[in-house]
Image (cartoon, rainbow, N blue to C red):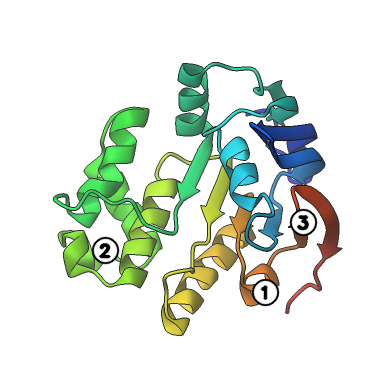
Amino acid sequence: MKAEEKGADLLELKDISKVYGSLRALQNINLTVKQGEWLAIMGPSGSGKTTMMNIIGCMDKPSAGELILDGVNISRENARSLTAIRRDKIGLIFQQFHLVNYLTALENVMVAQYYHSMPDEQEAMEALERVGLASRARHLPSQLSGGEQQRVCIARALINYPMLILADEPTGNLDEANEQIVIDIFRKLHAEGSTIIVVTHDPEVAEDAERTVVLEHGRLARIVANKAKD
């Protein structure tokens, strides 16, 4: 990994644009994210947040511009290569959880290991322990609360030690108590040196980030430096 030093550039978007037919979803986005930074992306519905997340997360390709991850331009890679990059370098956390309903929490985490290298039950259990769910490891998603399911998603995202954690509305389906638990996990990960990008509509979630990127009509409207918390 090239961007090991905290403060080195990990991700760079250079004049990124995305066009769907006549719709300009993103227009000339320029942004640099440093290793160990916590960034929030905000904006109203239709502002381009999801499109930006999909491009950063290697789930879509830009129509124009360059996406540099860990010193490598990945914006013109094919779908197979992008899948490998996403698997090896990015930990994805979704609002809708996307857990396999017939697998236990432990097995859902181990699935991510299977696609990356080799399942390791002990390592998967340790990942669940990090998010406070070791005691629920043998439960199915239907036996877990929404907050617990989201924590399984976080454990799954962490299991392959990604260089970038990318979360899409991670507290969108959670009540206030579970939202706080998830945010506390992100705070701990950030303190440990993880690079985190959170797409959110909630200002209270965004205020924990070091910077907030605000999108409007597919353009980068402003970047706000947030006040450091004690």
Q: Determine if residue 165 is in view.
A: yes
In the figure, is residue 116 to the left or right of 218?
Answer: left
Name the kind of residue labelled 1 in the image: Pro
> In the image, what residue occupies the spot 46% across and 18% down?
80
Name the kind of residue labelled 3 in the image: Glu
Q: Secondary structure at mark 2?
A: helix
In the figure, is residue 230 to the left or right of 157?
Answer: right
**Residue that badge 3 annotates:** 216
Q: Secondary structure at mark 3?
A: strand
Q: Please identify, in this view, whether the residue under mark 1 or under mark 2 is nearer the observer.
A: 1
In the image, is residue 83 above or below residue 6? above
- Which label is found at residue 80? none
Q: Please identify, in this view, whether the residue under mark 3 or under mark 2 is nearer the observer.
A: 3
> In the image, what residue occupies the spot 53% across and 54% down?
167
Q: Position of residue 39 (x, y in %)?
A: 70, 56
Name the kind of residue labelled 2 in the image: Ala
- Which label is found at residue 134? 2
Question: Closer to the N terminus: mark 3 or mark 2?
Answer: 2
Question: Closer to the N terminus: mark 1 or mark 3?
Answer: 1
Q: Residues within 10 Å of mark 3 (few under 14, many from 20)?
A: some
**Residue that badge 1 annotates:** 203
Whether the residues at callouts 1 and 3 have beta carbons within 8 Å, the answer is no
Q: Residues within 10 Å of mark 1 (few under 14, many from 20)?
A: few
Distance between the alpha carbons at the discs numbered 1 and 2: 31 Å
Q: Position of residue 137 (x, y in %)?
A: 21, 60
Q: Position of residue 230 (x, y in %)?
A: 73, 79
Quarter-of-image position of residue 56:
top right
Which quarter of the rendered picture does the N terminus lie within?
top right
Question: Closer to the N terminus: mark 1 or mark 2?
Answer: 2
Distance between the alpha carbons at the discs numbered 1 and 3: 16 Å
